[in-house]
Amino acid sequence: MALLRAFIRTARMTSTTSRLAAGLPADDEVLLDAPDDRLGPVLVAAGRGEYGPAAELLAATRAAAEWEDRDRHTRRLAAFARSRPEWLADWCAAAPQDPDALLVTAQQALDRCWESPARAELLRGLSPLIAAAAEAEPRDPVPWRIALDRARGTNAGHTEFERLWGEAVRRSPHHYGCHVAALQYLSAACCAQWRNTPHTARWSHRECFDFAEPAAQDALPGSLVQALPMRAAFACLTDDCGATVPRARLDAAADLAIALSAGYAAADPWPAEVRNLLTYVLVRLERWPDALDQLRLIGPYATSSPWDRISDDPLGRFLEIRDGIRLAVASELPQGAPVPPVLQAIPCPQGPLGNAPGHPRSEHGERARSGDH
């Protein structure tokens, strides 16, 4: 009889899960880190060894002061250059003083150093490259975002961090990448404090929120800076620092990010990483309906972050999480009950990520990525 009940329950779950898939793309339609319409053709040309389209794209972002686009494109082009260094070398040889080539070079060097066991020592040697990029285009905040990432990797002191932060916000007060870099610096400082003096950890986590919340309040309408408290919550839930902030503060951060996400169209690649991070946070908070709402808004645009923190196959892990949320919903719906638009998931004692909220632990050890924004 117990076996029969289990069989009937599984059949009901399967039927309901198929209904919950409405609005979600098929697994084979989901893309990982898909470039936007401007960057896609540039990467195709780069694959042919052509650097001209990349130079034109970054020059256009510089001329129009499109600093957010410039930051994103720079990081993607630097990632390409890591596997095709000759492409960037040809660009630099043809235009050694090009601000855009200098910027990609600085980002590529940062990425390369970051994965080395001798990270801090290697990063200290990047000052000339970052300075060259900053001097080539004095208006550009992106070199200062790179400098903030470097400061985190070298464990620079607060005085140096504040100097770099001042240079960044003087150029672009609401630049998302610089805000994320600053928050990551504070989060890293929190963990360093906890390892040395555990009683200060709770205060340090609150310092991250104390930085993120006013920045979000001051952000421009629709700015991704409004997601900064959610990123503080993400750091709190993933950093192995032993202490948490009050649940209400985590929920408020998630709520603000949900409101931001709702202002963008579904399947928009621009907020895709924020939506992926938000889904992770919502799952850790066991807010299943909100989590599946975000999956529908994500559409086919999965991003490596945050799933690469918990798996070497981020796309596969994203799809597993997606299925896990749907199954959690199906397991609790009454037979024949309609699926309300808002109800997409349910709480359970242990979520698909394998961690109950309130007991966060590191799921990535010492791993950190400068491009996680």
Image (cartoon, rainbow, N blue to C red):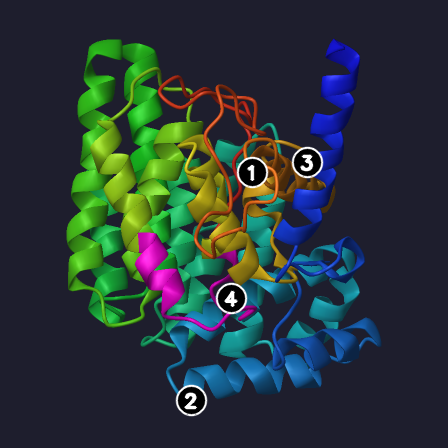
Sequence-earlier tag: 4 or 2: 2
From the viewer's perspective, is the residue at label 3 or at label 2 nearer?
3
Q: Which residue is mark 4?
A: 72
Query: Element type at marker 1?
Result: helix
Residue type, mark 1 in image: Val
Considering only vertical position in the picture, is 268 above or below 94? above
51 sits to left or right of 245: right
Say whether marks 3 and 1 touch (CB < 8 Å).
no
Sequence-earlier tag: 2 or 1: 2
Residue 18 in sight in this render: yes
Q: CA distance from mark 3 to mark 4?
A: 41 Å
Q: CA distance from mark 2 to mark 1?
A: 49 Å
Query: Element type at marker 4?
Result: helix
Q: CA distance from mark 3 to mark 2?
A: 54 Å
Residue type, mark 3 in image: Met
Residue 349 image offset from top left, x and y in percent? 48, 19
Which span of residues is magenta-colored? Answer: 257-273
From the viewer's perspective, is the residue at label 4 or at label 2 nearer?
4
> What mark, if any, has residue 329 been given in the picture?
1
